[in-house]
Amino acid sequence: MFEQLKRMLSRVEADYADLRYELKTETKISFDARELSLMTSNTTDGYALRVLKGGGLASVSFTRASDAEKAIRTAEQNAALMGGRIEAPVRFAKVEPIQDAYHPQLDIDPRLVSIDEKLELLRRYHEIPLQQRQVATCATNYLDLARDRYFASTEGAEIREDLVTTRILGTITSQDGAQTQTARTGCGGSDGFARVKHREAEFEEKTALALKLLKATPVKAGSYRVILNQRLAGVFTHEAFGHFSEADLIEDSPTLRARMRLGAKLGSDILNIRDDPTRLHQLGHYKYDDEGAPARPTQLMKDGALVGRLHSRRTAAAFGEPLSGHSIAEDFRFAPIIRMGCTYIEPGLLSFEELLAQLGDGLYLVNSIGGETTGENFTFGAQYGYEVKAGKLGGMLRDINISGNLYATLKNINAVGNDLQFGEAGACGKGQLNLRSCNGAPHVLIDRVVVGGV
Amino acid sequence: MEQLMAMARKRAEKVEIYSRAVSADRVNFENGKLKDIDSKLLSGVSLRLFQGGKLGAAYTQNLSDREGLVRNALMALKGGVEADYDLPKTGKLPQLDAYDPTIATLTNAQMAEECARISAAIAARTQAQVDVGAERMTLTIRLLNSEGADLSAELSRYGCHAAAMFPGSQAGIEQNLEGKKFAVFPDGMIDYVANTYKAALKEARPAGGGMKALFLPATLYGLVWRLREGLNAKNIFEKTSRLKSQLGRQALSEKLTMVDEPLNDKVPGARAFDDEGTPCRNLPLFQAGVLKNFYCDLRYGRKLGMTPTGNGFRSDTTNQPAPALEHLTILPGDKSFAELIGMMNKGIIVGGAMGAHSGNILNGDYSIGLAPGIYVENGAIVGRVKDAMMAGNVYETMRNVVAIEDTVGSTLMGRFPAILFDDVKVAV
C-alpha cells in the first residue's frame, strides 16, 4: 500500500504533502422495539490528501483512486489560493518521520467474532428491558468499526495503525399514561470485543432506572450546590473545558486566546486536568495521530492554572508550543482537526461519602445526556439526580439541565473525589464525529450551577 | 449499476441500488482570515436485497468489487430483518429545477472574495471577531429497483453564513443565506448582524420568571426537533409520541401551519422522489395548528397501514433509509421582525440555543442554555443575557404563539420564520 501512496505523493508539486488511505470495516446490528431492524457488514476505503504549498494548506478527500490526479490538482490550487491570501504562512512543527506499524492488543478482535454471536449477544441485552410492562420501547445498537490506516508523507513517514472500536449504545423508554422517560445504555471500548460481553447488569440497571424516572420528581429550577458523578463530571470536563484546550478552536479568537493563555489561573487550586491518549485500554487510546505525530500525555491544568494545550503540527508551530499529537480525523472523508484523546480530572483525596458531607444541602447529579458549550457558557443534561439534605441522599429528581459560566464554574469546584472513572462509549461532534473521544473524572463538588428544570 | 442489478437479481426476489456522489468545496474565514479550504469528491453505493420478506443491506464506496457487495448483503439477509413491504414502481415524476449549472463555474477564489467582503463589512461596523464561511455542493443521486424504477436527481446548493462573535465566546449573532446558486450576501443580512450585535453587546441581568420569548429561525430548531419526533411514524408505531391520537385535533396554536415541501424547487434540495424511490409530495403536518399527517418511509408505512409519504431518506449511503423531514417549512405570518420586537414588553430573543439535543424529546420537554439571550424591554433591546436557561414543553409553548414573522429563513432543520411565544419560563 505504501508504494501506491508514495507514487501518488510523488506527483504532488508542493512544499509538503501527506496522504492517508483507510480501509474501513464495520458491523452494525440494531434492534428497534420488538424487532431486528438492521444487520450489515461492510468494507469501504478512501483517501485524504493534504498539501502545503506557498504557505497555504489545503485538503481533499476522495474515494476513487482514479480521482487522485484531480484531487492533487485541486489541493495544489486551493493551497496556492490560500497561500496568496494569508498574512502568516502555515508552518508545521517538526516531527521525526516515523516508520512503524502499530496494532494495539485486543482481548478479542471483533472482526474475528461471527456476526451470529454478535447478533445473539445484542438480542439478549435488548430483551432485558422488554420484559417490563412499563417499557414502551427500546433501541439497542451494536457497532464494531476498524480503521486500518496507512499514513505516508513527503517527509518519509510511513505509519500503519489499526484503530478498532466496539460499542453498544441504546435507549430504554418507559411510559405511564402520557408520561415518557428515557434511560441511555452504553458500553464499549478500543481494546476488543470482551468489553461488550457479560454486560447484562448494565441493561438491568438502566431498565430499573427508566422505570424509576417515571416516579421521579421534576427538579425545581434555580441555583444549587451540586455533586456531579464521574460520568457527568467527565462530560463537563470535555465540553466546558476540554474543547477550549483545542488550539484550533481558539486560535482566531483574540478574546478567547487572551483568556486561555498559558499560566492563566482558571480553576480552583485543587483542579488538575490532563489528556493522555497513550493510556492503554481506554477508549481514546492511539499511538500516532492522523498527521503522523506521536501521541503525548499533556497536562492541561495544574493546581487550577492553564499549563498546556492540544495541538496539531500547524497550531503547535503557530502558538510556539509543544506538539501533542492530537490531530484526528473521523475517517478518510475528513481532514484531521484537533480532538481530545482521553481527557480527565485527576483524582483528589475525598471519598463520595466525604463529598456528600461537605455538600450538606444541594443536588447529586448523575450521568450525562449530552452537553454543549460556547466557550464562555455551557449547558448539559443530567440523566437524573437526587436531592441532598444534610449530606443524605433524598428523593430522585429528573428533567435536569444545568448551565453555567465556564470560568466561574471551574473556580467553584471546591472538592474532588478519589474515585476516577473513564467513559466507555463517548462520541464527540466537531464538524465530524470522533467515536473514540474519551473522558473521565472522579466525583466533584461545585458551589453554584444554574439548573433549568422543565 | 446495471451490472450490479443483473448480478443481484439472480440472488434475491427484490433489489434496490442507491448511489450518491458528492462534490463539495468549503471556504472558511475566522476573524477575517482565511482558515481552511476543504474539498470532497465522495461517492458511495448501497445495495438492498429482499428475500422472503427479509432485508439484507450492504454498501461500498465504489463498485470495484460488485461480488463482494452482493456477498455482504446476502450475509446480512441471514439476520432476518423484517421487510415485508413492496418497492415502489415509480415511473414518471414531475421535473424539478433543483440544479443550477452556474454552480459548476463558481470557484473557490470567488467564494474566498465574497467571504472576505462580508467579513470586512461586518468587522468595520462592530470591531467584533467575524466568522464567515461559504460552501458549494453538487449531489447526484441514482436509484434503481427490481420493479423497474430508474430514477435520478441532480442538486446544487450554495450556502454562506456570517456571524459576529461576542467577546470571549463562541456565541454570536448569525445570518445564513442558502440557494441553488451563488448569490451576493444581502446588505440586509449584514445590517442585521451588525445592528443586533451592537445592540446586544452590553450585558443585561433581568430577573427570571415567565416572559415572552422570540425564537429566531436558527434557534427554532430546539422546539421543532420535538415536533419532528412527535410526527415521526416510528414513534407513532411505538406509541411513544404524544401526538399519537391527535390526528384532526387542535394540537398547536391556530397561527401555526407546518408543511413538508419537497416539490418546492425555488429553494435548494427539492426532490421528486425519496431515497427509496417513493414519489415525494407536499405534506401538510399542522394546518392552522390542527394535526393533519404523520410522515413515514416504506417500513413504517407498512407497519401502520399508511400510504408511504415519500419521507424515507438517508444521511448518506452508509445509513439505511428512515423517516425524515428534509423539506420542513413553517409558513410566515404577518409581522416584521421589528414589529415582533415591538410587541415584547419584557422578553428574551433566543439568539443561540445550547443543549437542544438533550432532555426528554419524546415528551416535548426542552431546556436550553441561551447563547446568547438578548433581553428586550418595552420593545427595545436592552442587552445580552448570559448564564440563563429557558425551559418548557413544546406542546404547551406552541399553543402560546403571539405572532409570526412575515418572512422565512433557511436553517439546518428547515425554513422557519421567527416566532414570538408568550409566558416561557427563564432561569437566570
Image (cartoon, coloured by chain):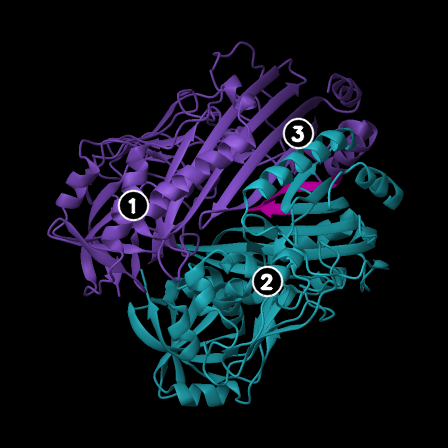
Q: Mark 2 points at which residue?
A: A203
- Occupied quadrant, residue B403: top left
Q: Nearer the viewer, residue B278 or B380?
A: B380
Label 1 in the same subunit as label 2: no
Give the image location of residue A117, x and y in percent.
77, 52
Q: What is the three-letter code of the residue carrying label 3?
A: Gly
Mark 2 residue crowding within 10 angstroms, few (<14) / some (14–19) / many (20+): many
- Residue B53 shows which numbered tag? 3
Q: Name the residue under label 1.
A: B194
Let me know if residue B97 appears in the view: yes
The chain displayed cyan equals: A
Mark 1 vs mark 2, foreground winner is 1
Q: What is the three-letter code of the residue carrying label 2?
A: Phe
Residue at the limit of the structure toward the top, as seen here: B92
Question: Bounds of the magenta span?
Answer: A30-46
Asked if residue B83 is among those painted magenta in the image, a careful observer would answer: no
Give the image location of residue B85, x and y in percent.
59, 26
Mark 3 vs mark 1, foreground winner is 1
Secondary structure under the numbered disc 3 in the rendered image: loop
Secondary structure under the numbered disc 1 in the rendered image: helix
Q: Specify which label sits upstream in the sequence, 3 or 1.
A: 3
Circles 1 and 2: CB distance less than 8 Å?
Answer: no
The chain displayed purple equals: B
Give the image location of residue A271, x and y in percent.
51, 81
Label 3 in the same subunit as label 2: no
Q: What is the three-letter code of the residue carrying label 1?
A: Ala
Q: Which quadrant does the N terminus of chain A fall into?
A: top right
Residue at the limit of the structure toward the right, as seen here: A3
On screen, residue B350 versus residue B312, left or right, reads left
